[in-house]
Image (tube, grey):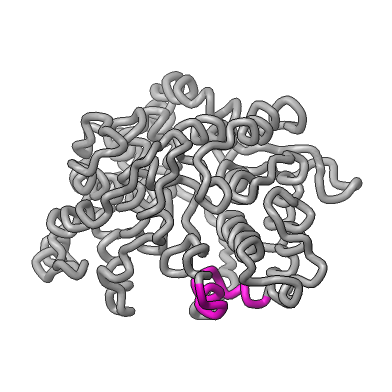
Amino acid sequence: MGAKNLKAIVVQGTRDIPVKDGSGLRNSVNALLPSFTGKLKGMSEFGTPGLVVPCESMGDLPIKNWVQGKWTQGAQKISAQQLNEKYLKKRFHCAGCMIGCGRTVGGTMDPHLEETGGPEYETLAMLGSNCLIDDLPSLLRLNELVNRLGLDSIETGAVVAFGIELNERGLIGSRELGTLDLRWGNPKAAEDLIRMVAHRKGFGDLLAEGLQTAAHRIGGMAPEYAIQANNMAIPAHDPRAYSSIALGYSTSSRGPCHLNAFSHIFERATTFPEVGIDAVLDRFQSEGKADMVIKAQNLMHLLDDLALCKFSIFGGVQLQHISEWLGHVLGWEISAEELIQAGERSYILKRMLNVNWGWSRKNDTLPPRILTHRVKDGGAGDHLPPLNVMLSDYYELRGWSEEGIPTQENLKRLGL
């Protein structure tokens, strides 16, 4: 849409949306509800900010532009527990959902604003720990600021951390920053830099082009400090803590995205037997990860196409439920196998769009800091993700060429 300069789509209608069997749908959902709400109680109570402390303990939290492995006291200061105790006003819900993992917090932008949307885990991680900002009120303010400016908090946090490291290492200085005191843990400087990016003022005009472009233009060692792939920032889960994340990021169709495969949940405590993910795999091993990531990607693309929340997996939603619901709403008879194949088709279509724009194995990579720099002081120890091995296994299992191109046989099998 952005490439077509399309800013919005407005849709207006007057008819009700028909549901073929409303009572059957209600009965099916109600039967699942006790288990669903019980299993997602923690998500209801803390939302995604509840991930900050456990992710730090596992070595999964980005800290100081991905060079530091431990930040225990800082994580406690920006934790969900602190958010709930001091700033939470109420929870908010997606339409029709009873979990309410969204946070509404006390106003932080101006004294006349009593309530604002609260931060998600990714925001607390990328603008918080990744920039060593441990002041929760400041992070609530930064969260509201990026939302108002229409900026992505993952990308913005990565850009701020990149700028801080450039300044620390002497690649930029007063000529680019003026009087801006850009250093670790300084929320006021982070806010000022974010405004410079949004309004394309001074050095912010270059940063607004994205990490890859900015690093290339600055030159020298700058690309080492831009933690991105294909001009998109790495989100707030570390492939050095979960090997499958490396494979999911590198083969994601829109640049590194933790929800493209969402595979690390299957390396921690979750299974999904309907697609063949029967056991929780060791998070550091490479064996079996390609097969698991493929199955996870197909499943997640199905959920995307149906606009179903991926957290519902934790509540016990299975393909059999989705098949039932499609039958009740649309009258379709569709098997679990057909559902997963629909997700696979969706993923392969996106891959082929990228291939036609010049995408290949050269794009299926991650920044050097993630692949080669050990962070020994955190929960991931000295582990590095074996991406090259997993990627070769992945192409073979997908039925792609060694350059990462889907074969004609692969496309024909899927009816593409």
Extreme-left residue of the structure = 409
The quarter of the rendered structure image containing the C terminus is: bottom left
Identify the residue at image location x=31%, y=45%: 244
Viewer-nearest residue: 221 or 30: 221
Residue 95: x and y in percent read: 57, 41
The residue segment tinted magenta is 205-220
Q: Residue at x 30, y 50 (%)?
A: 297
* Location of residue 56 with respect to 364 vertically, above or below: above
Find out whether residue 211 is within the magenta segment. yes
Q: Main secondary structure of the magenta part?
A: helix
Vertically, is 287 above or below 50?
below
At 17% from the left and 58% from the top, the residue drawn is 392
The x and y percentages for residue 290 are 21, 48
| 247 falls in the magenta region | no
Give the total number of marks visible in the rendering: 0
Percent x, y of residue 15:
53, 55
Determine the residue positioned at 15% across, 64% down: 400
- Expressed as whole percent of the image width and height from the top left, the position of residue 120 reads 60, 43
Q: Residue furthest front?
A: 170
